Amino acid sequence: MIRIEGGRPLRGTVQAAGSKNAALPAVMASLLTVEPMVLQNVPRLLDVDAAVALAEALGKEVRWQDSTIVLNGGRELAPEAPAPLVQRMRASFLALGPILARRGEGRMPLPGGCSIGPRPVDLHLAGLRRLGASFDVRGGTVHASAPRLAGTTVYLDYPSVGATEQLLLAGALADGVTAIVNPAREPEVVDLGRLLTAMGAPVTWREDRVEIRGQSALNGTTHRVIPDRVEAGTYLLAGAITRGAVTVVGARHEHLDALLSKLVETGAEVRVNEDAVTVALGVRPQAVNIQTLPYPGFPTDLQPPMISFLSTASGRSTARETVFASRFNYVGALARMGAQVQVTADTVLTDGVETLHGAEVEATDIRAGAALVLAALAAAEATEIRGEMHLARGYAGLPEKLRSLGAEVCVTD
Ligand code: UD1
């Protein structure tokens, strides 16, 4: 359980961690090569541990050195991913492309992950089918085979992050060029493209598509994972909701444009430079409306923390969620803390209140947890948040970072 005594303005500087959502596909990319891979700036998180455990179960040897992981071996890749690992974390499903590309067959349990609505993998499978794979789903497991993967043009009905990454990973060892039309363009996908290019499979971004030129074998490389824009955004919002001023060093402001422009609209002061972003807010923010969209739109992962922040604004804010169904499971807990929130279909309406108050609440996924932490930081009394393991999935060293900004946080069993 995390206990937070709220009501203290957060002030100071924190260092951005490496991006979880860029580190996970990077670990999966290591499955494509038998040469050593060095991934730097990797955050120590439960989800990264799960990805590492999966890579090990499939035949890699992995060593941690501070925030660097070194991945070796994997000459014989196992054909089957262990169900508990894939069910623990949805991104594990990305191992399917590499397993298929390396072995010509593989078995992958259907994934789990955050409880934020139905999250199918139909786009992953349809895309891999276009490259020549065939599937049979039996007993909750995808049995896949592809004696040969051949590059072709794949049109994505939706710019899915996972499906784009899956196809880039498979395309890296396919014959010829794989073109993904309507791809996801999230910075984490671009980072994977940079990594695959360094491994010898050039990735080219064009107006309507991304292309990868497949190779018969890939080399190892050293890759520095980009900073985590969602973590950075969460700390910036923590400063704003407590009417303080937080600087995140190492954050890339160009990855945070959608959030920062909304924060300016609320009245916050935003300062950016090459290597840091600062958000300061001394007064009550103005209500704003947001709509989540694929990048460069407002990120769905910042929707819950943003709503916490807006629940203390002056006026009515609306947030429309277009990326995931049912991503409002934290709203009931926020209401118990005094927020005036109503959910109608895909939209949350928030009539801002002057102050939130403490309560006993439970985090149900990573970003719901972040929303509750923010509300707790601003609340007049103490808040106890259960389900803190969700926070450990996505926020490295959260209690320490918050304390360094002046928050009163303790973690108990
Ligand atoms: C990734 C991120 C997650 C982020 C999301 C959107 C990782 C590990 N996770 O998740 O934090 O919130 O991008 O930015 O990087 N969909 C389908 N069929 C598919 C695949 C997706 O219908 O085959 C739907 C999903 O149900 C969802 C939407 O597409 O409604 C977006 O999903 P997607 O972009 O694939 O997100 P993830 O890769 O799961």
Image (spheres, helix red, strand yellow):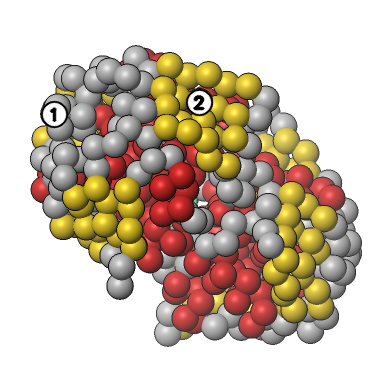
Which of discs 2 and 1 lies nearer the camera? The answer is 2
Amino acid type shown at disc 1: Val
Task: Give the structural element (helix, strand or loop) at label 1.
Answer: loop
How far separated are the C-alphas under marks 2 and 1?
25 Å
How many other residues sit within 10 Å of disc 1, few (<14), some (14-19) or many (≥20)? some
Residue 41: % across, % down: 68, 52
In the image, residue 52 sits, relative to residue 162, either above or below, namely below
Quarter location, residue 293: top left
Residue 406: % across, % down: 39, 41
Q: Residue at x 66, y 74 (%)?
A: 55
Residue 119: % across, % down: 40, 58
Observer-nearest residue: 146 or 276?
A: 276
Find residue 353 and name its label. 1
Which mark sits nearer the N-terminus, 2 or 1? Answer: 2
Q: Is residue 1 visible?
A: yes
In the image, residue 91 sits, relative to residue 249, either above or below, namely below
Q: Is residue 358 left or right of residue 266?
A: left
Amino acid type shown at disc 2: Thr
Observer-nearest residue: 303 or 391?
A: 391
Q: Residue at x 42, y 65 (%)?
A: 113
Q: Determine which residue is flagged by label 2.
A: 278
Number of numbered discs overlaid on the protein picture = 2
Quarter holding the N terminus is: bottom left
